[in-house]
Image (spheres, coloured by chain):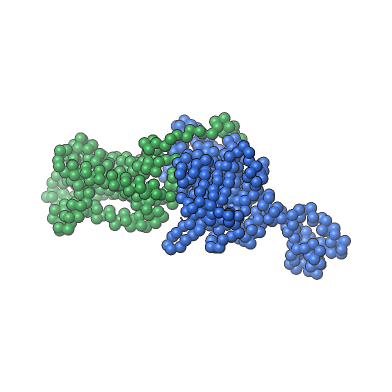
Amino acid sequence: MPRKTGDMTNHTHSAQMITARGLTKTFRSKGQTVEAVRAVDLEVADGELVAFLGPNGAGKSTTLRMLTTLLPPTSGEASVAGCDIRHDPAGVRRRIGYVGQGSSGGHTQRVRDELHAQGAFYGMGRRETRARAAELIESLELGQVANRQVQALSGGQKRRLDIALGLIHRPELLFLDEPSTGLDPHSRANLWDHIVDLRRSTGTTIFLTTHYLDEADQLAERVMVMDHGAVIADDTAWALKSSLAGDRVTLEFGSATDAAAAASRIGGAIDGAVMTVTAQGGDRALPRWIRELSDAGLEVVAATHRQPTLDDVFLALTGRSLREEAATPVPEPAVTTAAAA
Amino acid sequence: MTTTATTSSTTATTGPAASVRPTGFARDTATVFVRESRPLVRDPFSVIFSLVQPLVFLGLFGPLLIGAAGGDVAGTLQWFVPGILVMVALFGTASTGANLLFEMQTGSHERTLVAPLSRSALLVGRALKEVVPLTIQGTIVVLVAVPFGFRLDVPGLVAGLAVLAVFGIGFGALSYTLALSCRNRDWMFWMVHQTLLFPLMILSGMLLPLEDGPDWMQVAAAVNPLSYLVAAERALLAGDLGSPDVIGGIIAAVATCAVGVFVGVRAMRRAN
Ligand SMILES: Nc1ncnc2c1ncn2[C@@H]1O[C@H](COP(=O)(O)OP(=O)(O)OP(=O)(O)O)[C@@H](O)[C@H]1O
Ligand SMILES: [Mg+2]
């Protein structure tokens, strides 16, 4: 998969598909105010696949709901698929597809009927709708349940229907809010085949949120990290990992004294006889360190090397791990790249 | 990977759906109407199922009324069946908002809000759907009563169902409005529903005549649009199409429809 750089000025032939400036949403309920999204700026180029990452309550869905005209922003502005979200919401709606976080099939509707209705919603002709619905039913493996009511589907089957509904009109821009949540590994892989395929054949721009870090890492060309309503990082997964996290190397010694001696030479944190170093290019440094330490009489008895993950990136940015993150919205603004707005 | 390999070829040949059309209210309304009606077509039994309640009233209340009227079966049915028709319209449409309420809590309503559909059509299409079960149910109730001595007047029935349909669209729209303003508070929807429904029903004289009730009841009945509807249905089903009661019923139905659609469309426009 081609990787683009985070530098948005490089796109000569492609226009911006999404541009947002100072997008803000403040909810007021029962005397409490929740700053769900704080002055977010974002740019997504035509044809890009961008993943939006962040803990529960970070403001991902709220941002998507503003961009898809479901929620009026408290302040700020955005242009989506060439239309202003405030002044031309109808224009935005015609051009986008949206798979929300919830289940979007009507519970008393049959799967196939709902796909046909969706085609009609987007002004597709009868024949075209039927053909497209059949195609999606087949490729999203909904054939077994096509004549069943939505309320009788399993969670994963519902999710696949949601995705089919979002794809039926082949939008030029697709918003997916946690599309793979609730899918088994096979369906998840199938969904990704679909997304990759969709982009290859039609150049669809895709903006999605996910909690699967590996998914964002492997498939998105660009990762935006959101925390407490602000975008705190925005680059390729590779760039984020190498600039913010680095490889993690652990070296175990025969004694804590050896470990301390090694740490004073290489630098790193010690925990008993184990020393941990975070460094870029740790894989290449490891054999050299072992050799040098051995020459100095410090024998390494065990060594591990782990490439950084996006979780390490989040940890480096916020001091918290996404894996352990509980749904606790702390009303304290994080370091923000959107501070200018 | 094998399944997608076949899809990609078809996707590539068909290309993107460029059929972006201008949104038209009438077309959108039809689209929404068709979607809402589909479950009825797929599962007609559900329409029959909601007839249980009015038929129970007909079967258990009817004999009591007949007894009170000194055994005049035909006369009592002539008076009682139109009331049951209004009851069908009232109960059937009053709870239709519950479906929207549920769709708001899943993501189904949100999906229709993102689609390029006119907001008004989202409400009007749904409200118009109410006509379908209403007409079927009304017809069945009348047909059930015929063997017991109810005198069927076809033009009267058609006119009666038409007036009822107009009322049903309006009352359905009001139910949707209630759902839209209750959002995720189910309890509030059902509380308002229960609180209003029975007083509206009893104070319309649809089950028992109110002439002998206290003055305050007469006043309440006079401001209850359903009273006029019940009176009009009684005249229409008796074949008395020129009765002044009919005018009152038409006004009540049209007013309910106008108010319901007006507030409903406003609520839908504000929905997010
Ligand atoms: N309608 C609402 N009224 C009040 N507060 C809201 C509303 N919608 C969202 N919030 C609050 O806004 C914040 C951001 O919510 P949002 O749904 O955007 O998070 P998210 O990043 O999508 O989280 P998740 O990963 O759990 O889906 C949360 O604190 C949430 O409680
Ligand atoms: Mg969310």
Q: Nearer the viewer, residue B156 or A278?
A: A278
Q: In percent of the image, x 39 and y 36: which residue is there?
A: B24
User: Which color was chain B given?
Assistant: green
Looking at the image, residue A199 sits to the left or right of residue B33; the answer is right
Check the image and name the residue furthest to the front.
A340
Q: Quadrant of residue B9?
A: top right
Q: Nearer the viewer, residue B190 or A295?
A: A295
Q: Position of residue A116 (x, y in %)?
A: 45, 37
Q: Position of residue A181 (x, y in %)?
A: 55, 50
Looking at the image, residue A322 sits to the left or right of residue B244; the answer is right
Q: In percent of the image, x 82 and y 58: which residue is there?
A: A289
Q: Position of residue B127 (x, y in %)?
A: 33, 43
In this figure, what is the number of numbered marks?
A: 0
Q: In percent of the image, x 63 and y 39: which residue is there?
A: A12
User: Which color was chain A given?
Assistant: blue
Q: Nearer the viewer, residue B86 or A228?
A: A228
Q: Nearer the viewer, residue A69 or A323?
A: A69
Task: Assign the C terminus of chain A to one quadrant of the image.
Answer: bottom right
* Above-or-below relation of B106 to A274: above
Q: In percent of the image, x 32 and y 45: which residue is there?
A: B261
Task: Assign the N terminus of chain A to one quadrant of the image.
Answer: top right
* Above-or-below relation of A36 to B39: below
Q: Position of residue B54 (x, y in %)?
A: 26, 48
